[in-house]
Amino acid sequence: MHATTTEASLQQIRADVSRRKVLDQIFVMVGLLVMFSALLVLVILFLDLVQTGAPKLNWDFLTSFPSRKAERAGILSAWVGTSLIMLTTAAVTMPIGVAAAIYLEEYAPKNWLTAIIEINVTNLAGVPSIIYGLLALGLFVYQFNLGQSIATAGLTLSLLILPIVIVATREALRAVPRAIREAAYALGATRWEVTAHHVLPYSTGGILTGMIIGLSRAIGETAPLITIGALSFIAFLPESPFKGEFPFFSFAWLGEAFTAMPIQMFNWVSRPDPAFQVNAAAAGAILLGMTLLMNGIAIYVRYRFRKRINW
Amino acid sequence: MVEAGLLLAALVAVFTTLAIVYVLVVESLPFFRVVSLVDFLTDTMWIPLFAEPRYGIMPLVAGTLVTTLVALAVAIPAGTIIAIYLSEFAPYKLRETIKPALELLGAVPTVVYGYFALMIVTPFLQKLIPSLPGFNMLSAGLVIGIMIIPYVASVSEDAMRAVPNYMREGSYAMGATRFQTATRVVVPGALSGIAAAYILGISRAVGETMVVAIAAGLQPNLTWDPTQPAATITAFIVQVSLGDLPHDSIGYQSIFAAGLVLMLMTLVFNIAGFSLTRRFREAY
């Protein structure tokens, strides 16, 4: 009598568990479905851009200036502008971002100033990009009189990605074990020597990854560039940074008006004429391709460096 | 010496914040000398560039809130499901492959997402809702939602993974299944982190610019109906910036006033998020 009750309730529990386990399986399917639908969006988007833009994805598109005629328009001034802006952004962000991260990670005492800096870095990462555009318009364009130039654009995007680079660099520095630092100190190295000779070289991979991720964010930013007054119709190139005679380079291009890939694409996408949508798609395919490529490189660099270093 | 230089670099972050506040306040002061704060907050029309201008921020705020709500309706369920799946169910290898792929969704340039909303999502929605206009907040909001899925998913997942394993083991020992453990032990335990993830998503959606500027139309329109076209705060700033306004015109100053409102909205969400996070914080 007693044995059968136990048997019965055991069976009931088993039935109950297996019923609840069905929920597990349903959730796994729902999870996979949601995840792959999200990824599918990316694939559809890229394929559509390539397919729609296919007629324009050729050499002429890269070597032509924008034009009122959709079939003759190209992205020469746009990609040259984007390249020069990225150059400026990288040159400004790299030293400031890495220096700030070194300060916070290796030097900063635990006090109110450090706390304020850390709060600011976190909060800046959440500020909408268009606000950076307004900041640049008020500060760089009108107060510093840099005008609507490549320099302004580069500085603006640099401020925008600074939090990303600082956070990534700090993570990379933090990944270097304490033992390395202590060994160097034990041999009489100063704090700066420890940082410059040991910590920095070992964290190059992580720093590079952060820098590439930051630049891949900057390359697609449109709103702040519109706010500071990027033009969409530029039928000339800025002065070349390379010169035939001494000193072989020039910075005149920093002060010139500019357009950029995302600006060009926005201009085309907002025209009612469907012929321009082909251009927009082609520009979008190239822009998306570049972003995905940069992210791919970042993932690869991280993977390589992680594999090479065994603490 | 070296230390002073490094400190200076770190202080750039502080200077940036101060400069943002300074520029927004100083540049919008002349605007508020012309427009009274009461009109600004209560007028139902935003037509600053007309001959008889009216400066009610309400339509822009409404547009911003509608697109944000649509975006959250996509991103919160999808992001949370993905986070639970990756943290509690997915095998290690799948998780390590899928996470970087998902991050790519957040890396796509926003102008490309704008194209996606206007040229692919809207025509598709028009097949379902034939009366849908070519510019509408629905498709813009849906696309912003897809865009912020990775932010919501990855921060929530980090929070769930921070829940210690002995809590899961305790739950399993009581005969709970994975799904029960996930929804009744892990999610409540990670609630503060999940709230932070949602707040991050909201900030992104509120500040998103290009998708709405391209796909939602640029007409300020006081409506709560997502199938209508309307401008957001950000779209208005873009629209004015595309023209060539003189520095001392009220149109120029109005974008700083709009920017100030945007900044305050983000700030409110962040403060709300911060206090929520504190309230739900679990100590292990």
Image: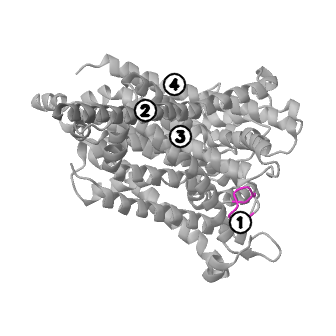
Q: Quadrant of residue B137?
A: bottom right
Residue at x-position 59% and y-position 56%: B69
Residue B56 location, x and y as percent? 68, 74
In terms of sequence position, does the residue under pointer 3 or pointer 2 come before the other? 2
The chain holding disc 1 is B
Amino acid at the residue labelled 1: Thr
Query: Which mark is drawn over residue A22?
Result: 2
Magenta range: B220-231
State whether discs 3 and 2 lie on one chain. Answer: yes
The answer to the question of whether label 2 and label 1 lie on touching residues, with beta carbons closer than 8 A, is no
What separation in Å lies between label 2 and label 4 (alpha carbons)?
38 Å
The chain holding disc 3 is A
Residue at x-position 23% and y-position 39%: B174
The chain holding disc 2 is A
Local SS, label 1:
loop
Query: Which mark is drawn over residue A296?
Result: 4
